[in-house]
Image (cartoon, coloured by chain):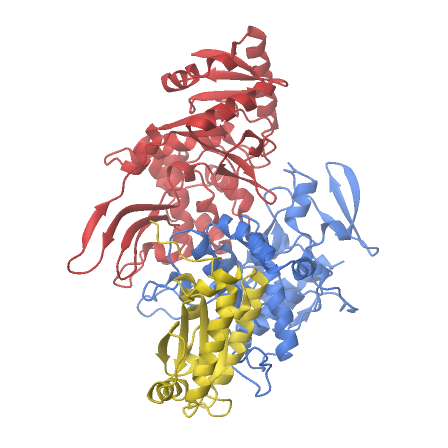
Amino acid sequence: MVDKELLVKTAKKIVSREDVKYVVGYKQGTYGFVISPSFAYTPEDVDNFIYNPLCKKNLTVYPILEEKLPLRREEEEDKRKIGIVVKGCDSRALVQIIQEKGLTREDLVIIGIPCKGVIDLKKIEKRFPNQTEAVNVVETDNAEYILNISGAVQHIPKEELLSEVCKSCEYPNPTIYDFLIGEKIEVGEVPEYSGLKNLDETPLEDRWAYWEKHFQNCIRCYACREACPLCYCKTCMADMLEPQWIRRSVNLSENTAWNIMRAFHLAGRCISCGECESVCPVNIPLMELNKKLEKDVKEMFKYNAGLDTKEKTLFGTFNPDDPEEFIM
Amino acid sequence: MENLVIQTEKLSEWVNEVIKKNKVFAPVKETDFSNFKIIDDYSEIDFTYLLPRVPAKKILFKQTETLFLFTPGSKGSVQTKEISDEKLVVFSLRTCDAKTFSILDPVFLGDYADPFYKSRRERSILIGLSCNKPNVNCFCTSFGDSPASSDYVDILLTDLDGKHLVEVVTERGKKFIDNYKKFFTSASKEDLDSKKKVEEQAIKGITRTMKLEGIPEKLDKMFEHPIWYENAMKCIGCGTCTFVCPTCHCFDMQDESTLREGARVRVWDYCMNPEYTHHASGHNPRPARMNRVRNRIFHKFNYYPINDNIVGCTGCGRCIDYCSVNIDVIDIINKIGEAES
Amino acid sequence: MTQEQIEEFEPNIIGFLCNWCSYAGADLAGTSRVQYPPNIKIIKVMCSGRVNPMFVINALQQGADGVLISGCHPGDCHYQSGNYLARRRMGVMRSLLEQMGIEPDRVKMTWVSAAEGRKFAQVIEEVTAEIKKLGPMKQFRREQKW
């Protein structure tokens, strides 16, 4: 249980600092179980901050979405810091971005929250459809969620609503923070990501049949790219026209090329927050690609993303003894 | 025009009969949602759906459309693309999806008629299905429509438990239904009454409303209102809201070619992408997310009503459902209604 | 595929050879009159590290049944570490393709030095035989039907 008062107090302290532009956190959304990002510019704005197991959104996209608009004459660049509320996975995204020099540590004031896992919105909406009123969810100590839906209190086992990625989370504690809200969580043995097991046992042709079905549905809205804190190239290869790496027409071939490119560019960088999968409007299980690469990169190169800001990137470095059994 | 009844067990026979002579699009169950697809058999149709994920606009206004073919080079040439004359049937359209076409018509059949859209519009029959279980973010009633409205379709079906009421609305629908006379019997007054009940029940299920009164005029004075900054801060700039929107219709032209052959294709574009307004000079007239979010709302609730006298939104609620950062168009418009301009 | 089909099928293989070792090696194979299958179409790149993984994907999209990337032996790279970096990338690319159900053996990598004309011919023979067994690439070929 995260102490809301402590969170608000800390955020208020940060936002009143002169060198801070705003603090981004979570607030209640406009309907049902939806949570909305909240931007606080003044201490009063912080009052609507909340934190509960529905706060899945990875807010670390916002510092990298900061727009650098052309300045007017004699206007000075706003170099103030951004305050941000992060969970374990989100903080790894920040570490990874800092490692790649996309941001500097000085750009950020980080409020870390040790996270016990978040609820998958798709799962809870399926279970309680047509929920218009806002609902507060509380997690108990014995792995249950308590929901108060129009007066009826419901106890639901955590397992049933928890996001799949959270079930195999190895880093629930923020790896980088200025303020920590709550106690650090002890991590035991974690099971392998459930999506991987299914695919490992299927033969090659069936795997392609599985992905073909999904890629055919892809509408190339690039929500996976925009929601990902680590997809922050100034010009994405998918948007380039000269050379045009991927054609704009939407068909199986181009959709596959896009999905291969996206997954590949996150190899050794993905921090398993599951944002890409949860924002996908056509439910493509993108984490099954990301998790597979995460696992292989760990096995092949003993590399973990987002743990140390001083570390070198996976593809920016090498080891002469890297595995090479595939080389003829 | 004419009210008929078809027994539910005969529905499959009728649809299969229709499939023989027409290309039938209907919602088909995908992994855990449904989407419009061409069907070969009645059994493929998913009747449990609320709304297909990608709206029905994709049938008449395809996501990727080839405009013409060419051979590149100094001796190159241009070949026109033949337009097929297949008959199309869009089966099981909800009101919000059917209304799409009355909103897209001024764009694609207005000053300049788009031959591809026009041709498909002319050879398609729209068969609606009354909505009996609205979604959490449905708000078609806010535009004066009903979940069981027959205004935008050729034929409207309503599920009456064991039988379907078939309302033939247009001349085109009548001509179509006349080919399949044997499946139908005429409707009684009770049938019409029970449709009323279904409709009322559905309307009761719609919980959210958008207060539209005076919004188009009010927006004129709110171009620089802080509300845009508030909402646009959240926007991550993905194209989900536009791609799942039944009325968003912006497109991009692309030449795709190899050394020997090529084609000009038209693909859906999205105004949430900075590239959308990026000039060749490098200048971008809509540089910030705030400009882009504002443009989307203005287009639907200001430019559209002023130019074509119809609000550019059908109330399907998809953009609210699939927005990952809770940019809620109902909330925005209602707040604009309350705000001081 | 039946044995007959395998024998009839002539695969298209794109080879990305580095300028300093493998391309010279291929040249040596030519000047030494060593025979190797004509299925490979060679594209010279300055270094195997220059091969963007999207080159591989685009090749597979546009008609290649297999892709071979060849660079200098480890430690011999003209740019010191280009081949090591390429090795990492292609290792990851192969595991991604495998997860998607695309035969990873369509992407091959090898080290051929400027003196190894004979080895080059041998490698091409092996790759061609292997891709022949896999058959035509059919998963996400670009269909030029507009």
Q: Colour of chain C?
A: yellow
Q: Quadrant of residue C69?
A: bottom left
The structure residue drawn at horizontal position 53% and vertical position 53%, both measured from the top left corner, is A212
The extreme left residue here reads B75
Q: Position of residue C4 (x, y in %)?
A: 49, 61
Residue A124 falls in which quadrant of the image? top right
Q: Residue at x 49, y 34 (%)?
A: B315
Q: Position of residue C7 (x, y in %)?
A: 47, 65
Looking at the image, residue B156 sits to the left or right of residue B308; the answer is: right
Identified at 69% across, 43% down, the residue is A135
- Residue A67's place in the image compared with A124, above or below, is below
Q: Would residue B277 be visible to someone looking at this image?
A: yes
In this rendered view, identify the residue nearer to me: C42 or C121. C121
Where is A51 relative to C97, above or below?
above
The residue at the far front in this view is C4
The answer to whether residue B106 is seen in the rendering is no
Residue A265 on image: x %, y %: 50, 68
Q: How far from the left and from the top, in percent, is residue A57?
A: 60, 56
**Front position in the image: A221 or A58:** A221
Relative height, residue B20 to residue A288 (above, below): above
Front residue of this view, candidates A87 and A302: A302
Describe residue B297's horizontal placement relative to residue A167 as left or right. Answer: left
State the residue at coordinates (60%, 36%). B136
Relative to A198, is C146 on the left or the right?
A: left
Chain that is red in the image: B
The number of numbered discs placed on residues in the rendered structure image is: 0
Which chain: blue?
A
Q: Camera-side residue: B210 or A197?
A: A197
